[in-house]
Image (cartoon, rainbow, N blue to C red):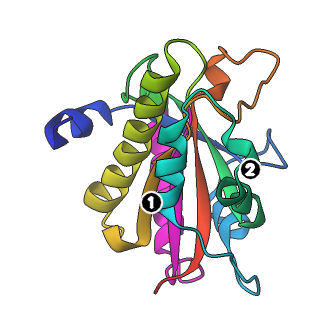
Amino acid sequence: MSIRKISAALIGGIMLLPVAVLAQEVSQQRIITTLDNAGKVAPKIDVELLKQQAAQDPAGSAAGLPDWAKLAQLSQLVVELNFVNNSVAMEPESYRTLGLIADALHHPNLARYSFLIVGHTSSTGDAKRNLQLSEDRANAIKLALSTTFAIKPERLFAVGAGQEYPIDGTNPASAVNRRVQLFNLGLLK
């Protein structure tokens, strides 16, 4: 997918919801507090290995893989993205929140960290296609943060999880499962 198509697709929206508290007001301070990793020792995450494992079995269970399980030990924020179905285009109401994320990543408390963006999809469609779509969505967010909002690209990593880890496991086809997670990978190397 070309950069022009990805950039055009980013004309859309984001609604942030912390993992533990799903119905609170989005603010820069909440993002900073949720993602700040001060005092924690982050396990080493090999992003390329995560990609390889997801690609080996896109319809399997990444949850059981040790490298994916390490992500649960990191400071994280669930970013509920209102994506157009089967697309990297975000819904328009998401601009404000994307800006809040960018502002938070520029804050001195977070400026020293690198972040992993994990894309997710609902279960509609083919598992292999969903894996690619989730990675495209994560890369679209990475591109927007690094180009439009001047976050240093070396601080950002992207990977797709496909339809794994649905928020609403009782309805995996639900739009609520189309989201992105941000993980604090620890101090910038």
Write down the residue under mark 1.
Answer: 48
Residue neighbourhood size for the residue with mark 2, other residues' Cα within 10 Å, grouped as few (<14), some (14–19), many (≥20): many
Mark 2: amino acid: Pro
Q: Can residue 39 be seen in the rendering of this structure?
A: yes
Q: Residue at x 83, y 47 (%)?
A: 21
> On the rendered structure, is 130 left or right of 123?
left
Residues 52 and 34: in front is 52
SS at badge 1 = helix
Q: Residue 19: horizontal and vertical position, in percent? A: 77, 48
**First to last magenta residue range:** 94-120
Number of the label disc, if any, that sits on residue 93: none
Residues at discs 2 and 1 in contact (Cβ within 8 Å): no
Label 2, label 1: how far apart the Cα atoms are: 26 Å
Q: Residue at x 71, y 84 (%)?
A: 38
Q: Residue 86: horizontal and vertical position, in percent? A: 42, 18
Taking the magenta stretch, the answer to whether it contains residue 108 is: yes
Q: Is residue 107 above or below residue 5?
A: below
For this orientation, the residue located farthest to the front is 56
Mark 1: amino acid: Glu
Q: Residue 99: horizontal and vertical position, in percent? A: 45, 53
Q: Can residue 152 be seen in the rendering of this structure?
A: no
Q: Residue 72: horizontal and vertical position, in percent? A: 76, 58
SS at badge 2 = loop
Quarter where residue 34 is shown = bottom right
Q: Residue at x 66, y 42 (%)?
A: 62
Residues 168 and 91: in front is 168
Quarter where residue 79 is shown = top right
Q: Is residue 166 above or below residue 114?
A: above
Q: Residue at x 44, y 60 (%)?
A: 48
| Closer mark to the observer between disc 2 and disc 1 | 1
Write down the residue under mark 2.
Answer: 18
Taking the magenta stretch, the answer to whether it contains residue 88 is: no
